[in-house]
Image (tube, rainbow, N blue to C red):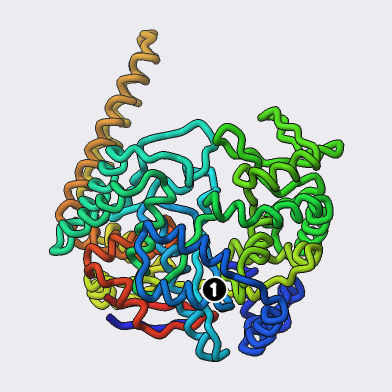
Amino acid sequence: MKLESIQVPVKNRVLADYWSPNTAIHTFFEYEYSDESFKQRVKYLEQQARDQKELTAIIRRYMEPLGLSEKAKEHLQQLEQGAVAVVGGQQAGVLTGPLYSVHKAISVITLAKEQSEKLQRAVVPVFWIAGEDHDLEEINHTYTMHGVELKKRAYSERSRRKTMASTTSLNKESMTQLINTIVKDFGETVYTEGLIKQLVDALNKSETFTDFFARLMNQLFKEEGLLMIDAADVGFRQYESEYFAQIINHSEEIARLVTEKENEFERVGYDKPIFATNEAANLFYVKDGERHLLERRHHQFVNLAANIKLSREELLAIAEKHPEQLSNNVVTRPLMQEMALPVLAFVGGPGELAYWATLKDAFAALNLQMPIFAPRLNITIITRQVEQLLCEYSLTVEDVWEGKALQLKNQFIADVQDEEAKKQIQTMQRLLLEQYEAFEAYLTEQQISLEKILAKNKENHLKQFEYMQQKVEQTVLSKHETTIRKFTKLQNELYPNDGYQERSYNPYQYINEFGPKLIDEMLKKTYSIGNHHYMLYL
């Protein structure tokens, strides 16, 4: 396994500016990303130090059924004794969801290790599972390589209700079928049988999307001691009770400040990431298992579509007695993390960076300080077969990203076409059309009116010429299918759906090829958070 770091143009402007000095983006954050910032932030956290025993007990209780490694126990002990944390998170996707979920976890672990050494104090890695999210259509599928073709493989069960991932029961038969389909797409290797057993065993111990996700993530990162907590965990929700009350009491101010900050963000040239409004409550209410976004209207917290109307006092009572009925949105989740965890830095992707840029004043409204934002690592995994194809056609990964593999494919297809056959078909078509013109002229002379029949007859003949041309092209291309498939494989492996690999594929595609120690081997490499892209050659 070989790791290379390359510089590539950052297409996301917010992220590009974040890595550039003297850009407007920096005024929207408390800290720039630097070693000095980490020193300042840890001093701030030491001043805010609090008892972390209850928090540690909640995380331990959540993780014990998943299996606690010695490293996880060590991190829990350190957290209990006052360690700070690097935090990142993701929705509970099928088979961990896209690769960037794994890349986030690697980023969290890497940064925690790095800062622990630099700051000479305990820094633990924490993964926040967004199990409260209810957009199941976003997390119920993955993409695979079926041969050289890209396939979307989705869990067949559908729910019309807005239930959270952490409370949505899995149909184990349907999920087992999906696992088998996905792994079949991967192709048979020496690791396949063990992989299927591992996935099905984890599934059989799980009841919900979040259970399944957490078990798989724990299997992958157990030895590194990655701590995990589900945002929808009832015990954690009870711990957050007083923090929900603070959010409710400052709801109007938070909404106003985020709306103003987003407008400012737009004025300096960026897009609106949230489309915030002054009426937003930035909280969900869970009713009959469904999650409903609240707004503030006429001094009430409402969702008119769900017939929910709550006074501030009623919502505060829910926060006190039944906090599991409340849930955060993109605005309040970072605020809740800051209140609930000792966050040294938050690891996120480009989308998260954009909406975090609107939150600085909202943090201040709750007497909080925005933590350091650490953009996650970008990693592309290159299999041996793909590496061989890149060498065969003298291409780089960047070339594929820029469309050069597709250009070569299209040029090759154009070059192998049988031009003589095409010309002969065109000649036959031209002669036939000339005969039709002569026949039409004769019928007109004889005052025989058959225009519709002639038009239909001519249309049928032209369709046959088109069909013949297509069959010639297909037959020619089938002779060169091997070469065409190579170009298709390069494109779909490295730039599926016109985006980075990490946005489409799950890690098990590569575990099936490399083996169950893939993540362990990846974590043995040296990474650093920064404006670069890592190439991992298996």
Q: Residue 265, image x and y in percent?
A: 76, 64
Q: Does residue 314 appear in the picture of this structure?
A: yes
Q: Give the vertical position of 509 relative to 31 (above or below).
A: above
How far across and down, in percent of the image, does residue 465 sit?
A: 26, 35
Asked whether 410 or 232 is in front, the reply is: 232
Residue shown at 32%/24% (left/top)? 458
Give the answer, above or below, for where 385 lies relative to 271: below
Task: Give percent across and percent down for residue 158.
Answer: 42, 34
Does residue 528 appear to the left or right of 178 in the view shown? right
Return the x and y of residue 472 as percentages of the image width and height.
20, 45
* In the foreground, 121 or 12: 121
Q: Could you tell whether 50 is left or right of 458 in the image? A: right
Outermost residue on the right side: it is 298
Vertical relation: 41 (above or below) 60:
below
| Residue under the point 47% across and 68% down | 104
Looking at the rendered structure, the number of numbered marks drawn on it comes to 1
Instruction: State the residue at coordinates (66%, 60%).
Output: 336
Quadrant of residue 42 in the image? bottom right
* Position of 222 relative to 22 (above/below): above
Q: Quadrant of residue 441?
A: top left
On the rendered image, what quadrant is the C terminus found in?
bottom left
Front residue (pair 506, 450):
506
Type of amino acid at the residue the image marks with label 1: Glu
Which quadrant would the N terminus be assigned to in this image?
Answer: bottom left
Q: Nearer the viewer, residue 209 or 533?
A: 209
Q: Residues within 10 Å of mark 1 (few under 14, many from 20)?
A: some
| Residue at figure coordinates x 22%, y 38% from the top left | 468
* Numbered disc 1: secondary structure: helix
235 lies left or right of 313: left
Q: Is residue 505 visible?
A: no
Would you name the residue on which mark 1 appears?
80
